[in-house]
Image (tube, rainbow, N blue to C red):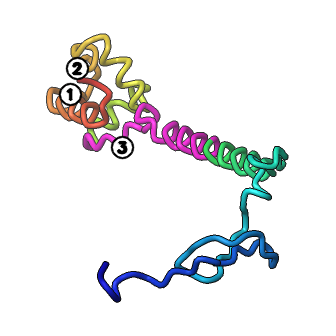
Amino acid sequence: MKEGIHPQWYPEAKVIVEGDEVMTVGSTIPVINVEIWSGTHPFYTGTQRLLDTEGQVDRFMRRLQRREQIRTAEEELAEKRDPTRLTVDSMDLGTRATNAFIESGITTVGDVLVLLEKGDDALLALPGIGQKALIDTKRFLRSEGLID
């Protein structure tokens, strides 16, 4: 065995739990302080300790409530952002086309979609709406993901 490479061995090292010496063992340190040993561990003593899970349940319920609040806020934001509720002005079609829609009683993007479902001719039949306005309208609706 090489000299000087091994730690010092203490054959009578004391194991101390809460200030009391409970046993002696061989170790590389002279005193070992532990919080739990076989004399106090529930597995060896057969006793069961009660755990306070109330705090864990409360934390879980707070997290669950917070998640519901976030989900509700996201749904409200998505509802506000619903492109079918936007006004015709937001489509940036130009003054002539916008006024033509408003005079025809079409005030929201949803109204334009309903009319466009009948076909391009239904939109072109409105006075003041031409091919350019139709193309710009479809371009806007595609950018909002409302049509293919």
State which mark lies toward you, 2 or 3: 3
Residue 40 percent location from the top left of the image: 79, 58
Residue 26: give x, y in percent of width and height: 58, 72
Closer to viewer: mark 1 or mark 2: 1
Determine which quarter of the picture holds residue 38. Answer: bottom right
Instruction: Using the image as rendered, state which of residue 85 and residue 55 is in the foreground.
Output: 55
* Left or right, 3 with reference to 69: left
Q: Are marks 1 and 2 in contact (CB under 8 Å)?
A: yes
Sequence-wise first label, 1 or 2: 2
User: Mark 2, residues whose alpha carbon is within 10 Å: few (<14), some, or many (≥20)?
Assistant: some
Residue 37 versus residue 109: which sits nearer the camera?
37
* Left or right position of 112 against 12: left
Q: Where is residue 3 in the image (x, y as percent from the top left)?
A: 33, 87
Q: Is the magenta stretch mostly helix, strand or loop?
A: helix
Q: Which label was assigned to residue 90?
A: 3
Residue type at tag 1: Leu
| Residue at point 36%, 43% (across, down) | 90
* The magenta segment: 68-94
Position of 135 relative to 117 (above/below): below
- Label of residue 134 in the image: 1
Label whose residue precedes the other's in the sequence (1 or 3): 3
Quarter of the figure that contains the N terminus: bottom left
Q: Which of marks 2 and 3 is nearer the N terminus?
A: 3
Question: Which residue is label 2 attached to?
Answer: 124
Whether 70 is among the magenta residues is yes
SS assignment at label 3: helix
Residue 133: x %, y % from top left: 21, 32
